[in-house]
């Protein structure tokens, strides 16, 4: 069984601060996705990384896929209240996704 | 592109009734759709994988007779919660896999909040 450990589970910060969320596994994934979910809504795909060492940027969000394709990180610069939500990493293997437990981020004004 | 709709968004029913939830991929064909269940402030729990034209594959511990899945076309999958009970109350989310080789991108519907009284 493939497992994805996501940390931290909860994060409460002030507007303007930086943060990093980590996603680690002992398994190799063919791809890794990051999703953001707001209460009462479905997850929204932020990014997909497929190549070891790949770095992708989406405005203030930077995503990195580990060289061995077993881990990933999400870094947010100058967080804003609109970044509040549940961030989920998901590793792809065959046709299924394995989800981490999520990071509940609260950005206080 | 890659929009998935889900209907209804909310449903309240009496114990013992059956509820059907529809999941549609609006602008792409999805050979595989997935059904998840999510509890408050927790991650998604995969219930079953739905393949067009074949029987669904259920995860361990999910009752296939209680959660009936039909994937009749490349754009529609349905989940029927049969004889619903209060413990079935949850947030149900579907996703559709866009079939790009080597990719496992899934696009999620907005979810259905089921409340069983």
Image: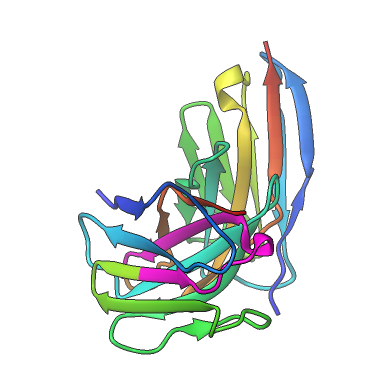
The magenta segment is B78-98
Residue A95 within the segment the image draws in magenta:
no
Residue in the foreground of this view, choosing between A64 and A19: A19
Q: Which residue is the extreme one toward the top?
A: A109
> In this view of the protein, can residue A86 be seen by the observer?
yes
Q: Position of residue B113 (x, y in %)?
A: 52, 49
Q: How far from the left and from the top, in percent, is residue A91?
A: 58, 64
The answer to whether B74 appears left or right of A53 in the picture is: left
* Near-viewer residue (A33 or B107): B107
User: Residue at left 44%, top 71%?
Assistant: B80
**Is residue B22 positioned above or below B91 on the image?**
below
Image quadrant in which the N terminus of chain A is located: bottom right
**Residue A80 appears in the figure:** no
Q: Percent from the top left, x then y, of residue A102?
A: 68, 49
Which quarter of the figure has residue B108? bottom left
Residue B90 within the magenta-colored segment of the rendering: yes
Q: Residue at x 70, y 27 (%)?
A: A106
Q: How many marks?
A: 0
Q: Is residue A1 above or below residue B11?
A: below
A39 is higher (above) or lower (below) than B12? above
A20 left or right of A61 in image:
right
**Residue ID at (34%, 89%):** B54
Q: Residue at x 55, y 79 (%)?
A: B66
The furthest residue to the bottom: B54
Q: Which quarter of the rendering shows the C terminus of chain A?
A: top right
A97 relative to A9 in the view: left or right: left
- Using the rendered view, name the quadrant where residue A4 is placed: bottom right
Front residue of B37 and B106: B37
């Amino acid at each position: 069984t493939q497992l994805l450990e996501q940390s931290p589970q909860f994060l409460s910060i002030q507007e303007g601060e930086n943060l990093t969320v980590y996603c680690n596994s002992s398994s190799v994934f063919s791809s890794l996705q990051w999703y953001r979910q707001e209460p009462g809504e479905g997850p929204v795909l932020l990014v997909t990384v497929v190549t070891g060492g790949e770095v992708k940027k989406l405005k203030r969000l930077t995503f990195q896929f580990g060289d061995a394709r077993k881990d990933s990180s999400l870094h947010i610069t100058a967080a804003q209240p609109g970044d509040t939500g549940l961030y989920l990493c998901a590793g792809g293997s065959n046709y299924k996704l394995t989800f981490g437990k999520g990071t509940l981020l609260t950005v206080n004004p | 592109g890659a929009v998935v709709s889900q209907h209804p968004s909310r449903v309240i029913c009496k114990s013992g009734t059956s509820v059907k939830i529809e999941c549609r991929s609006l602008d792409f064909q999805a050979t595989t759709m997935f059904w998840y269940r999510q509890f408050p402030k927790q991650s998604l729990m995969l219930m079953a994988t739905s393949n067009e034209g074949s029987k669904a594959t259920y995860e361990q511990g999910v009752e296939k007779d209680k959660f009936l899945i039909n994937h009749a076309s490349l754009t529609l999958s349905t989940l029927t919660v049969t004889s619903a009970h209060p413990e079935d109350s949850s947030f149900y989310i579907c996703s559709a896999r866009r079939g790009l080789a080597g990719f496992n991108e899934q696009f999620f519907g907005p979810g259905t909040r089921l409340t069983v009284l």
